[in-house]
Structures are given as structure tokens and as C-alpha cells.
Amino acid sequence: MNTACVLSSLVAATISVAGTVPAVADTQMWVAAEDLERHTCPSAECGVVGRFYFKERVFVYETMKGWSRVSPYQAAGCYDGRSSYVEVGRSECTIANGIDEGEFAEWVRTENLSKEQPEKPYEVHG
């Protein structure tokens, strides 16, 4: 079997297992705030799963209503209806909290990101 056939088979297997083609980040950006919360959905009402720090590099997968998705979808660690990854705020494993079928992605406010590595931090928003 040639290399092209092997690669084609691997891609087909990945798609059939995952159901979709894996998302690829298309934009590199920099955190321009001192302490930027990572949320389970594009809303300040959703749970916080961690933080990014000033000048940290992130990759943006998509943007929506002033928010940027900065991770692929991943397991939410749901147990008894709660995500074990949520550090602060809402932890329920619901679509309203950005957790669908046991998976979530990390979202940050787009206004706290910069296309260039920043010299000094912005004031944190949201």
C-alpha cells in the first residue's frame, strides 16, 4: 500500500471516529491582558476553566459575538452532571454552559487579544 493510500485511510478513520474533520486554528494571537479567564462558552456567565497570562500565545479557531475560541473541543470531565475542569462559576454539564455531549472548548474575550506581541498589558475586559 502506498503512502497516499495509508494517509487517506487514516484520515477516513479519523473522520468516521470523530464524526467531523478536526478543527485547525487559523490565527495566532497574543494575550494582551494580565490575567485572562478561559470560559466554557462565549459568555462571562459560563464557567472558568483556567487563565491565560500576559504575552502568552494562543491560536484562534473561530470568533463569535466578541469572543474567540482558543482550543479544540475536548472532554469536559463530567461527573454527576458537573464538569471537573471548571474552577470558578457554573460547572453544570449543559449546553447553556457550553458543554455538549460531554465536550467543551475554551473561549476568551477577543478584545483582550492582540495580533502583535504587546508591549504592556491592556485592562482586562469580561
Image (cartoon, grey):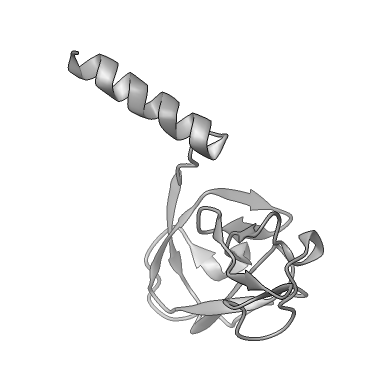
Q: Measuring from the top left, give residue 85's x and y in whole percent.
A: 57, 76
Q: Residue at the spot x=63%, y=67% of the render? A: 109
119 versus 58 height, above or below: below
Q: Nearer the viewer, residue 44 or 23?
A: 23
Q: Quadrant of the N terminus?
A: top left
Would you say 117 lies left or right of 48 here? Answer: left
Judge whether residue 21 can be spotted in this image. Answer: no
Q: Nearer the viewer, residue 31 or 73?
A: 73
Would you say 4 lies left or right of 8 here? Answer: left
Q: Measuring from the top left, give residue 78's x and y in whole percent.
A: 64, 70
Residue found at the far front of this picture? 80
Q: Residue at the spot x=56%, y=34% of the render? A: 20
Residue found at the far right of this picture? 96
Tag count: 0
Q: Quadrant of residue 7?
A: top left
Q: Quadrant of the C terminus?
A: bottom right
Q: Measuring from the top left, give residue 18's x and y in whole percent.
A: 52, 39
Q: Residue at the spot x=74%, y=55% of the render? A: 65
Judge whether residue 126 can be spotted in this image. Answer: yes
Q: Nearer the viewer, residue 30 or 9?
A: 9
Q: Residue at the spot x=45%, y=48% of the render? A: 27
Q: Nearer the viewer, residue 58 or 50?
A: 50
Q: Quadrant of residue 117?
A: bottom left
Residue found at the far left of this picture? 2
Q: Measuring from the top left, give residue 2's x and y in whole percent.
A: 18, 13
32 versus 87 height, above or below: above
